[in-house]
Every structure is written in structure tokens, then in C-alpha cells.
Image (tube, coloured by chain):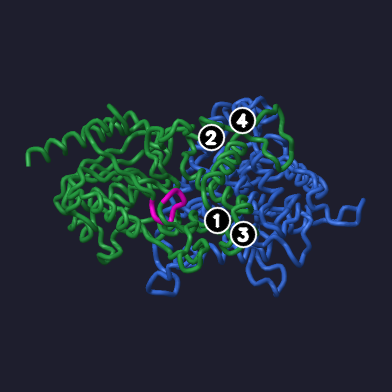
Chain colours: A blue, B green
Amino acid sequence: MTHALTGDAHVCGRHTPEDKKPGWWDEMIGPGKAVDTNKYFVICSNIIGGCSGSTGPQSIDPDTGKPYNTNFPVITVADMVRAQKRLVEHLGIKKLLAVLGGSMGGMQVLQWAVDYPDAMDCFIPIATASSFTPQNIAFDWVAREAIKADPNWKNGDYTPDMPPDHGLAAARMLAHITYLSEESLGRKFGRTLQDKAEFDFKFDFDFAVESYLQYQGQRFVERFDANSYLYITRATDYFDVTAKHGGDLNATFARVKSAALVVSFSSDWLFPTEQSRKIVDALLHNGKEVSFCEIKSGYGHDAFLLEVDTLGRMVRDFLHYRQEARNHE
Amino acid sequence: MTHALTGDAHVCGRHTPEDKKPGWWDEMIGPGKAVDTNKYFVICSNIIGGCSGSTGPQSIDPDTGKPYNTNFPVITVADMVRAQKRLVEHLGIKKLLAVLGGSMGGMQVLQWAVDYPDAMDCFIPIATASSFTPQNIAFDWVAREAIKADPNWKNGDYTPDMPPDHGLAAARMLAHITYLSEESLGRKFGRTLQDKAEFDFKFDFDFAVESYLQYQGQRFVERFDANSYLYITRATDYFDVTAKHGGDLNATFARVKSAALVVSFSSDWLFPTEQSRKIVDALLHNGKEVSFCEIKSGYGHDAFLLEVDTLGRMVRDFLHYRQEARNHE
């Protein structure tokens, strides 16, 4: 299991009784669920560069005894996957049944399938793309500008008691808009006002959607590190699974040795279905076994976390089929 | 003629030999052009709240002898149009042939048609909507957060030598992304690098699209005032032409007395064709004379400034027809 931009290793269940919420994909994973932990052993590790466990900008540099901050090397999705591969080797696993994940998790899935073609029976890239588009890169640029413009950022050397919360919240709010569809924003908020009957004609929030964004930004800064956000978004910018194969997706996927289930969502404008189709076409071009589904959904990119019923059935059946095939080998 | 968010009264031609560029819609307007100044007298004034001439936050408050800054009252699109109506009355014009404009200019056009139904023979709202959507509002919120987060903003009381350029540039970059389509960004930049053959693996710009955005942001702060940007975007948030008519577009357009040409662009995701169709449907519901065209274009919202050939032919013929009809009355 690979996690998305701001996800972490806590993929399902409650680790301690103090956990207020279960893991981020709890509806998908667990005993009797789509990814049935009575049948499968699920592994999910924190990506490097993150702030939830693996080494990242907040980690202490042994040479200086201080956090790396911006001395941390810029990382790529391939680096994240390389670290995951080492973990799997450390655990003594020869071949995974599946590698699956959505969004930036889906990028890691594609990288796994290309870099370690013998390491899995199948892979499931969800709501993702074979490379980050210029529009994606552009949004990331503005998000990082917001963080760097925060006077508390101090070229990355902020202190835990004065982090660049304002900038990080703005970055999160911007990203959050791209996770939703115009349809879902319209249905959820429309032009409804927040706890008032008339406009204030001020610059504080009047609209419910403004209050919601502000809340999302504030919640996010409580759990995420600004430097990590810089590093991880930069990794997504650099993501292009064809990079080491002459920019040719057909040539890249010639390396793949496992079957794929590719899933997209109809209202996802951050990673539109067209991007998934490119992946499918290139796999088919190479005669690979591939199933594809565009799930009709109004939720935008967030659908990969919300359309659990439809997605879950698909993933459950695909994993079951691959497991059966594996047992007959 | 009504101008868009960051436009101004300089709509065509060069006012002085020092003008480096002609007006922002020069390809549409001028002798022999679609809006033929040999036939028509064109009026375009700076909106109130702006920073190019009419009263705005930079203007001197006569009570204090200092700029209004954030003491300037929050304004609406209806306020802009009310000021324009006064100008037209001052010029002694009883009835305009047409009111036309794109984007926020289109909002003013709709407001004109509803608030002053007897003041024109026709109106041409281009690439616009009858109300600002929650997605539009959300983007504006983040843009304003970027400005307010800039330490130079100082609650609006910045000095001319230290304006909040960083925040205003970020706001502009964000808006700029929404003006382009994924297709146009892909065609124009793709994942091309800027003056280098390999990634630097740093946080400065590597990609051409990043360099382009940065350039757009820097150019913008040279010509625009941050407080004006706050006020004008707030006016667009509040825009809902149905607001004084019970939120009912059919009831709102019952007031309209002139013919309309409504134009949208296929790849415009900021003001998608669906929004223009709502306008057309409500006008038809009221038995109004309305022409509608969705122009196929890959340029996104910016198409209203770029697809001048197609748009120009349509506007030229529509104006000609309305002028003929007027002459026969």
C-alpha cells in the first residue's frame, strides 16, 4: 500500500485507544473489507521526506545534531519506492501480491511496476498519471511560494514554536480546491453563507466554502510540517515514470511483468481519466494484462477516498482473482 | 465596454507614443475592426475599486488626507455598473447600442441588462456567469490569503516603496493558472525545462511553466495594487445577478428588455459553457431574443482575449444587425 501526498503509514484501524480517528483508508482495509486483512498481509510505510516517521527534513542530521531542514536532499518518487523495496526485502518477502495506492500513491505504484517488475503479481494505480502535468506543477509552484513567503519560514530554519502556519495553510487550501470538483463544491456549499443571513461586506469569511477552506488549512498545520510539504510536492513535480526510458511510455511499460487494474474517477480534474487511459493504452500496446474502470463520481479527485463501495468491490475481486492465479502457478 | 478583473479603460490603440503596448482588446476594437470605431463610439471606464483611474483604495480620503487603503468601502459589481451609468448619463447618452465585456466584464454586462434594461439595445456577456461559483470563491479566498500573509501588507497600510509584492504575485500566479486550460499549458510548456537539460533538484525553477508563472507574477506587481486586488476579487465573490430578485434567474431576466449575444469557450473551466447556458435558458424562458455560441478553443478562459477572429466576426455581425434594427425603429 502506498500513501498519498499528506497520508501516512496509518492506513486503517486504531493503533492505540487514544486514536481519535481510524486510518485514512479504513473503509477499504480491514477484516472482511475490500482489502481483507483476514486474507492479506498489508504493509504501508511512511514515505521518506515526510513528517510521520521515515527520515525527512525534520529528522536530526547526525553530522550537525540539528534538523536537516532544507539541507535534506531533494527526493523523487523513485527514491520513496527504493526505500519501500528495501523494507520489503528486510521483511524477507520475495514477491508481493499487489502494490496499490491512489494519487501520489498511484505514482509510487507505477514506479514499483517499472523499477521492480518481478516484485509483485499485480499493481493498482488509482486516480493518478504517468507524469505530473504542467497544470499540476503550476499549482505546486504557487503552493510553495505561499510557504516561502511566510516570514516564519526563514529559509526553512523555523522553530517548532513558530512554524510558517499561514503559508502552509494557504498551500493546503489551494491543494484542497483541486481535490474537489466544481460539482461537489456546488452541492456541498453553493453560495450558502456561514452562520449569517446577509453579507458582511468585509474580508473575513462570509461564504460557507471560505470557512470550510480556512478550517481545512488550520487542521492541516496541526499535523504537517511545512518543509516536508515542500519536499514531497517537489517529488511529485519531478515524477515522470518514463524519465529513464527516453520519455516513451510504451518503452517504459515494456518492462512491466505483472497485471494491472487502473482506476480513474469521472470528475477528477487533477488526474483526469485521460491520464489513466494513457497508462492503459501503453500497457495494452505491450500486450500486458490490464483492467480499467472510470468510476462515475461527482467527488473530484477525493473520490478515491470516498467511492469506497464501487472501488472496493473492484479491488476485492481483482485481488481475489490474482491470488487464485498465484495459487495455481 | 466593460473590462475584466485586472483590465482598465485603455481598451485599444496607443494613447501616447510612449505606450509600449496597445490596449488589452486592440485586436477587437478600432477602425475597421470587429467593434468598428469608424461606425461606433466606444466607451470604457476604469471600474471603481481599481487602481487605474477611478476611485479606489489608493485614492486619497479627503477626511484624512491619506489613502483609503482598507477604509475604502467593500464594493460590488452593481456599484461598478452604477458608476458607469452615471458616466453615460453625464455624457448625455440616452440609449447605448450595446454593453459588452468578458469575464468580470461579462458580470457587469449582465448587471447592466438587469439594472438598467432601457439603457441599451443589446448586451454581450462573454465567458462569464450569472453568479460566482463556490470554486471561484475558493480560489479568490486563497489568493487573498496569500496577499494578507505577506508581512509587507500590514493590514493594508503598506507604503508605495514596500508593497506586498510577494503575496500579490502569488495571487496572480494562482489566478493565471485558472485562466489557462490543461491543454494550453500542455501545448505551451509540457514538462519542458527552463534553460537547462537536467533537473537541478532544488526549489528554484526547473520547469518552463514555473518560470513563466514567476514572470507573470513579477510583471503584474509592477502595474497593480494589492488592496485593489482584494476589493475587486471580493466584488466578484459577491456577484450574483439574481441577488435582488429572490435568487431566481428566470425572475431576474424578466426585467431584460434588449437582445443578447452570449458567448462561451469550450475549454474555459473557470466560467464553463454550462454557466452561459443557464443565462441563455433563463433569457429564452422569458421570451427574450438571444443568440448563443460556444466557441471551440483550447485556450481556456483566456480565449476571450485570444480567439479574436471567431469572436470578432460574431460580435461584428451582431452589432451590425442590432444597429440596422435600431435604424428601422
Q: Which residue is denoted by mark 1 in the rendering?
A: A176
Question: Which residue bears the numbered disc 2?
Answer: A280
Q: Which residue is drawn at 23% across and 36% down?
A: B40
Determine whether the residue tagged by mark 2 lies in a helix, strand or loop. Answer: helix
Q: Can residue A307 be seen in this view?
A: yes
Q: Given the image, on which type of amino acid does mark 1 rest?
A: His
Question: Residue B304: x, y in percent?
Answer: 37, 38
Pointer 1 and pointer 2 on the same chain: yes
Q: Mark 3 points at which residue?
A: B149
Question: The magenta stretch spans which residues?
Answer: B47-53
Identify residue type, mark 4.
Thr
- Tags 4 and 2 touching, CB below 8 Å: no
Q: Which chain carries label 2?
A: A
Label 3 chain ID: B
The residue at the point 49 percent across, 47 percent down is: A268
CB under 8 Å between discs 3 and 1: no
Q: How crowded is mark 2: few (under 14 residues within 10 Å), some or many (20 or more)?
A: many
Image quarter of the N terminus of chain B: top left
Q: Can you tell which quarter of the image residue A218 is in?
A: bottom right
Mark 3 surroundings within 10 Å by alpha-carbon count, few (fewer than 14), some (14 through 19), many (20 or more): many
Q: What element carries label 3?
A: helix
Quarter of the figure with the C terminus of chain B:
top left
Q: Which of marks 2 and 3 is in front?
A: 3
Residue A72 at what x, y percent from top left?
Answer: 80, 48
Question: Do tags 3 and 1 sit on the same chain?
Answer: no
For marks 4 and 2, give the one nearer the viewer. Answer: 4
Element assignment for label 4: loop
Spatial CA span between label 3 and label 1: 18 Å
Which disc is residue B192 wearing?
A: 4
Q: To which chain does the residue with label 4 belong? A: B
